[in-house]
Amino acid sequence: MSSSAIDAESPDLVCQLDNVQGLVDALSAVRWKRHQDAVIELSEHGIILIVEETGCLQAKVYLQRELFVRYEYSAQGRPRFGVSLGLFADCLNTFSAPGHSSLIEIRYPGPDMQLLVKSVDSLDACIYAEVRTRIPDMISWDYNFEPAGSTPLTFTVKSAALKEAIDDLEWPGSSIQIKLQPVPPSVSFKGEGHGDLQIDFMYYVNTDLLIAFHCDREVSYRYKYKFLRATTSNLPGCVIKHNRGSKLIIGRGGMLKVQHLVSVARTSNQHPHTDSAGYQQPSQIAYIEFFVKPEEDEDTIN
């Protein structure tokens, strides 16, 4: 591909990122099947990537403009375009080298509405790539997440423990019941199949696993196992290693929101900026959100 394609006039977005692997990790977290389409939305505030499954599961990757070393946005409105998630992630992965922070530039649109990517930090060679885009399909459902009441129904659990619990509850074609109760303050995950298995997180007892808990009434919903598993099945190694914590919130009607934080801090000998609690600054974090609809025959305890 000629360099003139990369230098297309008046792009909607020109941005540069100095940690390609962090971006690949963030995208991989929402890649729960091999062939998966995604919608990318651009704005002056950053980039949002959206994927969904059969109107029951939706995931979003938020890449705030502060993650980028350069972010020039000149579009009117919020352009949207569709891409193959696997193709985009695999393309970016070719720019990543272990132990090296590659600086890449992303432009949209190219002459034929492509998403253009090139390396910009090498004096010896330059890699160019283009990802074909398409007119996006409409998002089939609006997650419309609303609080379930005046008191949030939410808990935060160590990411590794959450993934392990969901993996252990696998039953073919089954559903998983998530139950919160204020007395004793606890969260239960129960899978049913050829028998049943229940995993309990007791607040005040397992504060090293169940980090935070807010619940003023007993509530229980069921979710398809395959959708619940998708929220943790491809968590990148950095999330498991740092094990900060994943936040789960039950909204109105049982809508489940699962939030993860993925580090996009540059890999270097320098220590990333952290706050007093040891957490990285928001500018170095990609936010991942999953929205899972409950099964229609959910059991709600008032």
Image (tube, rainbow, N blue to C red):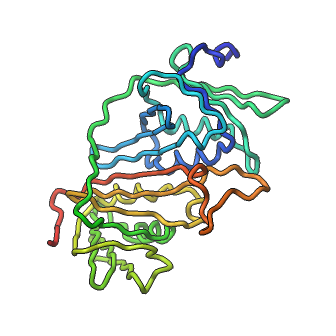
Of the pair 83 and 192, the residue shown nearer to us: 83
Q: Residue at x 40, y 47 (%)?
A: 59
Vertical side of 77 occupied by 93: above or below = below
Lateral position of residue 169 relative to residue 161, left or right = left
Q: How many marks?
A: 0
Of the pair 60 and 87, the residue shown nearer to us: 60
Quarter of the image containing the N terminus?
A: top right
Q: Where does residue 9 sit, x and y in percent of width and height?
A: 60, 13
Lateral position of residue 106 relative to residue 164, left or right = right
Lateral position of residue 165 relative to residue 186, left or right = right
Q: Residue at x 52, y 45 (%)?
A: 27
Q: Where does residue 147 sit, x and y in percent of width and height?
A: 26, 58
Lateral position of residue 106 relative to residue 217, left or right = right
Quarter of the image containing the C terminus?
A: bottom left
Q: Residue at x 35, y 56 (%)?
A: 257
Q: Residue at x 45, y 33 (%)?
A: 40
Q: Where does residue 75 sit, x and y in percent of width and height?
A: 49, 22
Q: Where does residue 131 sit, x and y in percent of width and height?
A: 55, 27
Of the pair 47 and 187, the residue shown nearer to us: 47
Vertical side of 251 occupied by 82: above or below = above
Vertical side of 59 occupied by 167: above or below = below
